[in-house]
Image (cartoon, rainbow, N blue to C red):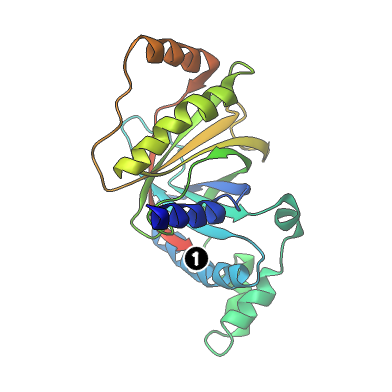
Amino acid sequence: MKNLLITLALIFSFSINAQYAVMYAVDLNQGAEEDYLSLEKFWSEIHSEALNQGLHDGWSVWKRTPTDGDQESAAEYFIFENYSSMEQMQKGYNALEIATKVYKGKKSRRYIQSMVQGTGITNPHRERRVYTLQGVSATILAGGSVKPGDVGTINLMVKKSDDFENYESEIWKPVAEKNIMKGSLRQWVLAEVINRSENAYQDWTHLVWNLRGQGTEFYETSGFIWDKLWEGIESSRDMSDATELTCVYAVN
């Protein structure tokens, strides 16, 4: 038990370092998926070196599972860049300089420059909507670092009352922690949108992230007290259906 607690403490200390994230919702041009994945594979090496230099805390690309009734502008991919502080996020870095270092002797300077500047291939993006997120509450990250093939979900939320964040952190987070202990969940995160691009959707205020585990048994909530708590949770926000994402690239 002592070793388990030490392990969980180490994972928790690691996972909460990412207090901020930039999320890109990527809408691709028709038939551009292959070019897009080639572009992100090129960038994965840049992000790996940026992580080594302490310029960010992680980067990942996730493919959205299509659903019936998808709108034409629905994002096919989501990108997350994680940062430990506002200062780290705002500092930025010279991507061309890092790319030149990473691909030295492997790619020509002209090729590197064209890929970084987005002129090396036909632009695969029809639109990129950008959201800056600040962590509000989170569980541990169990089961090791995120890797390709991992599956998670996001729920977009609209805050309706001042109690919303407390309901999520004090009532729902403990449920998520029990599901982590059962192995059906690896992480739960509540984040607030603190900035967004002009073309981004303007209505939602928060999102919840769930990283799935391998287990299929979930903690059951029932009874009069829970029913009353659930009424409070539901009245504090509007929540969209879950959007399923599968990890394609991960640097952490």
x%, y% of residue 150? 35, 53
- Residue 156 vs 247, above or below: the answer is above
Amino acid type, residue under disc 1 in the picture: Leu
Residue at the image point whose x is 49% and y is 18% from the top: 233
Residue at the image point whose x is 63% and y is 80% from the top: 100
How many numbered badges does the structure rendering display? 1
Q: Residue furthest front?
A: 2
Nearer-the-camera pick, 155 or 77: 155
Nearer-the-camera pick, 34 or 149: 149
Residue at the image point whose x is 47% and y is 24% from the top: 239
- Residue 156 vs 26, above or below: the answer is above
226 sits left or right of 135 in the view: left
Instruction: Classify mark 1: residues with Cα within 10 Å, few (<14), some (14-19) or many (20+).
Output: some
Residue 89, image quadrant: bottom right
- Residue 120 vs 58, above or below: the answer is below
Q: Residue furthest left?
A: 216
Nearer-the-camera pick, 228 or 134: 228
Nearer-the-camera pick, 68 or 12: 12
x%, y% of residue 243? 40, 37
x%, y% of residue 64? 39, 45
- Residue 169 appears in the figure: yes
Q: Residue furthest bottom?
A: 105
- Residue 124 appears in the figure: no
Residue identifier under label 1: 39
SS for tag 1?
Answer: helix
Residue 83, image quadrant: bottom right
- Residue 247 vs 95, above or below: the answer is above
